[in-house]
Image (tube, grey):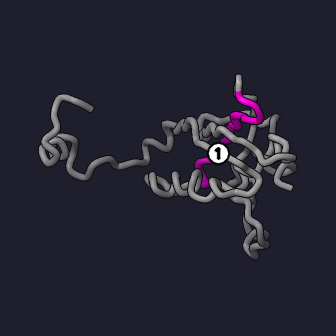
């Protein structure tokens, strides 16, 4: 039961949390709190099996938290589930690691009929860990022959 561990409506987000908003359609009979908690669990520290290292690590430090759920206006049985992830969960400077963790495994989860990542907010503390292009923007523009635009 993920709801007891990963659904934390009293959680106050931190400036260093990565915040994700998922549009969730739970399977029939699955309450939105359980669906939101399942997304938070499966995209962070939740697993369907016992892992021997669980006793060595404080999962509370690394777990994602579904902290708010609201119904989607005009859509039956659809909700926006807001999930906060601590920076310690992710490798610094790795877009691949971040996206693999957040969206890599959750879309096939059985408790959900449909799931879509709607929004992602990345804190400045994490953005600063990215090195950017190895040669600078001008070299990249020259290689791509793209000027005067982002």
Name the residue rendered at 70%, 49% in the picture: 39
Q: Residue furthest top?
A: 73
Q: Position of residue 2 (x, y in %)?
A: 82, 53
Image quarter where the C terminus lies is: top left
Is 96 displayed left or right of 75 in the figure?
left
Q: Position of residue 102 (x, y in %)?
A: 59, 51
Image quarter where the N terminus lies is: bottom right
Rendered view: 46 above or below 71:
below
Residue in the foreground of this view, choosing between 136 and 80: 80
Q: Secondary structure at mark 1?
A: strand
Name the residue rendered at 66%, 41% in the picture: 84
Q: Position of residue 116 (x, y in %)?
A: 60, 43
Boundaries of the magenta span = 75-89
Name the residue rendered at 57%, 57% in the picture: 104
Rendered view: 74 above or below 69:
above
| Residue 79 highlighted magenta (yes or no) | yes
Residue 23 is drawn in which quadrant?
A: top right
Is 40 displayed left or right of 133 in the figure?
right
Residue in the foreground of this view, choosing between 127 and 108: 108
**Disc count in the image?**
1
Q: Residue furthest bottom?
A: 52
Q: Residues within 10 Å of mark 1 (few under 14, many from 20)?
A: many
Is 81 displayed left or right of 4 in the figure?
left
Residue in the foreground of this view, choosing between 51 and 82: 82
Residue named by callout 1: 115
Rendered view: 47 above or below 28:
below
Residue 90 is drawn in which quadrant?
A: bottom right
Q: Position of residue 134 (x, y in %)?
A: 25, 52
| Residue 134 highlighted magenta (yes or no) | no
Name the residue rendered at 63%, 53% in the picture: 107
């Amino acid at each position: 039961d993920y709801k007891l561990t990963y659904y934390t409506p009293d959680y106050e987000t931190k400036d260093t949390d990565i915040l994700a908003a998922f549009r969730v359609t739970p399977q029939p009979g699955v309450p939105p709190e359980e669906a939101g908690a399942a997304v938070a669990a499966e995209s962070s520290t939740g697993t369907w099996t016992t892992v021997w290292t669980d006793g060595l690590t404080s999962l509370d430090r690394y777990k994602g938290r579904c902290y708010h759920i609201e119904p989607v206006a005009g859509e039956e049985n659809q909700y926006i589930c807001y999930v906060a992830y601590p920076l310690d969960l992710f490798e610094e400077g790795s877009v691949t690691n971040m996206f693999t963790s957040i969206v890599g495994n959750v879309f096939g989860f059985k408790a959900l009929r449909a799931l879509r990542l709607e929004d992602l907010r990345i804190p400045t503390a994490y953005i600063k860990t990215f090195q950017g292009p190895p040669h600078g923007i001008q070299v990249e523009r020259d290689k791509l022959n793209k000027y005067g635009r982002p």
